Amino acid sequence: MFKLTLYKLFENIDNILMTLIIFLITIGFITLISAAQQNTPLLWGQIINILIGIILLIFLSHVDPKRFLFYSPHLYILSLFLLLAVNFIGLESHGAKRWINILFFNFQPAEIVKITIPLMLAWLYHRFQNSINYKTHLIAFIILSIPCLMIWYQPDLGTTILIGFSGLIIIFLSGLSLKFIIISIFSFLILSPYLWSTLHLYQQNRILSLIDPTKDPLGTGYHSIQSMIAIGSGGFLGKGWFYGSQTQLNFLPETTTDFIFSVFGEEFGFIGTFGIFIIYFLILYRCIDMAKKMQNTFSRLTTAALTFSLFSSSIINIAMVCGILPIVGAPLPFISYGGTSMVVSLIMIGIIMSLHSHKSLIAN
Amino acid sequence: MDLYKFKYTFKQRLNFIFGLIIFIFLVLLIKFFYLQIIQFNLYSSLSTSNRIKIIPIPAIRGQILDRNGEILAANKLIYTLEIDPEMKLDLNKIKNQLSDIVEITKYDIKKYNKIFKESYYSSTLPIKTNLSTIEVAKFVANNYKYPNIILKHKFSRSYPKEKSGAHFIGYINRINKKNIKKLKKSNNYKSYMGLDHIGQTGIEFFYENKLHGFPGYKKIEVDANNKVIRTIETVEPKHGKDIILSVDYKIQKVAEKAFGSYKGAMVAMNPKNGEVIAYVSQPTFNPNLFTNGIDEINWKRLNSSIHKPLLDRVVSGLYPPGSTIKPFVAFAALENNVRNPPFSIQDKGFFIMPNSSKIFKDWKKGGHGEVDIIKAIAVSCDTFFYGLGIELGIPKLNNMLRKFGFGDKTNIDIPNEKKGLIASPKWKKNKYKKKWYQGETAITAIGQGYTQTTPIQLALATTKLINPNNIIQPYLFQQNISPKYMKKELENIKENKNLSLVKEGMSLVTKEGGTAAFIGRTTDYNVSAKTGTAQVFGLKEGQVYNEATLPDRLKDHALFIAFAPSENPELVIAIVIENGGHGGSTAGPIAKKVFDAYINEAN
């Protein structure tokens, strides 16, 4: 009886994807133990984050995709309200309002948008799947722009780009004409000087420090350099668990969040980073495979968009710590410490699994 | 757009994005490969230098002592206020900040700027040195007010005898850029880690390697806030070795006192082993001025004075030997069977050059009467030596001078020693493109030509007269004496009858009728000597030398070489008094006082 319940509980879980995700989370937690530097409460906090995330994942895997489809507009509207609320009851830190406190925990509404935007856009294209034209794309663009502008206003450049990107991916996948894409890219390039002027000074500095990180070693480029030193000094085999001097002696900032991959690179070397890349590849391959096999527009678009949302976060974070991108403050999904990031990432996987296991329900 | 086409486009574009992400991951992988494999060494060393700091522990410089343990160069504990030049602080602001505690003068600021510009520094530079105890206490009490100013205690060189003996003791100053270049070239740079000073002259320079020791260091691990996590390794410094000199400071003081305000040099050495007992160069300077960077006013005063107080006249002062050369010339003649006794001349006070009508005068009007070679030394008969020189010839004369060490360094353990000069026809041709005249041979024989010596050379040459069988090299610090430093060429001067004749002549110098007879009258031991007077400028024809009317700087140099007691010499002295007039009367009394002090002390 109990066995049957347990089976029922996991019946909608995709074993391959789940194994890979658990593997990634485990590696991330092992790294976090070293990166936390004896901060035990932080480790317990992360365990709770993981548990909440996995419970939500299991729960969502059982949810009928029809419900996702039905509630997508509601969730979208709700997330807009939450974003609006940030302006009034948001907690300010580092000159930006990103967090709100609901009940007893803090979270970032922008992270919720990472889920609601793909759902909403997928809903839109699903709804008009037989008559997709430039109007549909225009509406999609407007739906995408509203939360993006609100998040930019917080300001949170990193999340804005991430969300904007995942939304644009959906529009792209939904058949936006190539001619239009090319024209848009050109006009963006032409407009970029103006966009540059709207950036905050610290954001400009972060981008500038990327071009020449040595220019200001104690200012904006300092973190980037220290991160590269951490990774580079890891060498082939790494310095060993708990033996990363850049990490343990605090030369590396934000070891548990933004720079956790530098900690991993320093302590486990190229062998370790190569291994992680393999896992990422397998996850990506599995998700794309699932998206292709899905039988309706909503499921396909949602799965693809959520996958790319996860991967663009990962790419931005990894590119940031190895000095390819400026330090924009993006966590690494499944690995960085942080409730919102962990829970949202697992929710995304949960939704994908639900869409995957219920494929027959809303086939077209 | 129909659904079929939509699905097709979707799959196509999905594949495109999949490929794009794979491509991006490949780029990232390459970047990690580059960082962790290709540039591993670079980042590994950057990571190490992030966390490992090396803090030098300076070695304490060795002291310099005289033979009786009297301290000539010591280390004094001083307190300094220092600032980090990298912080580029406003000095005037600091001056105002510190005004309650200590006055920072204009000179302090000038000195700071000079040090900053010229010298190498390991960490901070002093803005104020030599704080009093009260100033230190005040600063410590208000420490929190001055986060940028560091109170340091360190050992600073001090020369308790100040001007006395400054030339051979030497001085140290802050390491400057030139020193660094040299140290790097000789691979000694490492041993100056954490040190700010280096010997510049005298013993301080010559024995720099022994004195300065080898600094130690502490290797520590720090975190990003420069907090020390642990000490990895401590290497204790090897402190510098003390140097005990052969100099007897008591005798040194007697000599300096006897010198009074004369300019010149004196060296007294033990003829048995070459130990230098006293070493005087006047005028002198205070070496303490240099230790923490000399200020501009004092530097100008010392450097541009016409009296050249910084010149070490004992080894770098070049003087014509005057009549002090006569014993050596006489020995050269005797060894070549020229003018051997009982040969004598009738001196009427002048000498006529053979085959010429040129007349060379003796210093004494009317001459010395009948003069043989012994009397010629005792009364310093020029007439006798003119003829002797011409008959002997310049090559043989110079050969013998060379054997006595003229024209070459004595290799004393003091820097900047000059070689002197033995003038010869070949030298003259090279230098002036002119022929050598016979008359020049004649005046070379009485020490008035081009030939030049240093006081230390005169002392060594005199030693060789007394102790011809042993190779003697003058020194101040005996541990240095190793075969490497000894002169290779053995001088084949032999103890023989000729040498005894020369010495007999020198012993008569201090007896009645000799040129320094007063010494014999006032001492109860026998002194052998030779006086000398060297012309500073050549008198023009018809001009008469009149000491009373000449300005001081054109007066003759007075020279004097001596040893005592004559029978068993314990001390050799060579003196040069610049513009001192006659050797016997100005240099003689100084020598007598030093002999008295030394011989009385020994007994």
Image (cartoon, coloured by chain):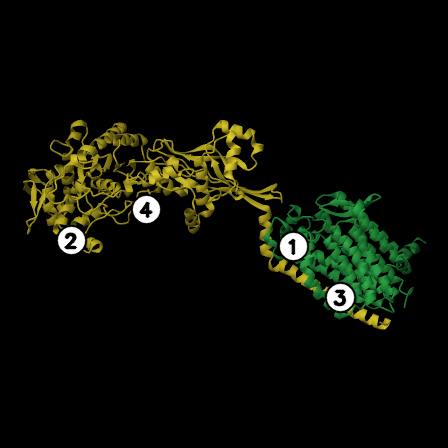
A19 versus B250 height, above or below: below
Mark 1 against mark 2, which lies toward the viewer? 2
Res. A14 visible in picture: no
Q: Residues within 10 Å of mark 2 (few under 14, many from 20)?
A: some
Mark-to-mark CA distance, 1 and 4: 57 Å
Secondary element under disc 4, as helix, strand or loop, is: helix
Mark-to-mark CA distance, 2 and 3: 101 Å
Chain B's colour is: yellow
Residue hosting label 1: A231
Mark 3 against mark 1, which lies toward the viewer? 3
Q: Do callouts 1 and 2 mark residues in contact (Cβ within 8 Å)?
A: no
Q: Which mark is residue B485?
A: 4
Rendered green, the chain in question is A
Mark-to-mark CA distance, 2 and 4: 36 Å
Q: Which mark is residue B18?
A: 3
Looking at marks 2 and 4 on the same chain, the residue that comes earlier in the sequence is marked by: 2
Q: Chain of mark 1?
A: A
- On screen, residue B255 versus residue A230, left or right, reads left
Q: Chain of mark 2?
A: B
Residue hosting label 2: B436
Q: Chain of mark 3?
A: B
Q: What amino acid does circle 2 point to?
A: Trp
Q: What amino acid does circle 3 point to?
A: Phe
Q: What amino acid does circle 1 point to?
A: Ile
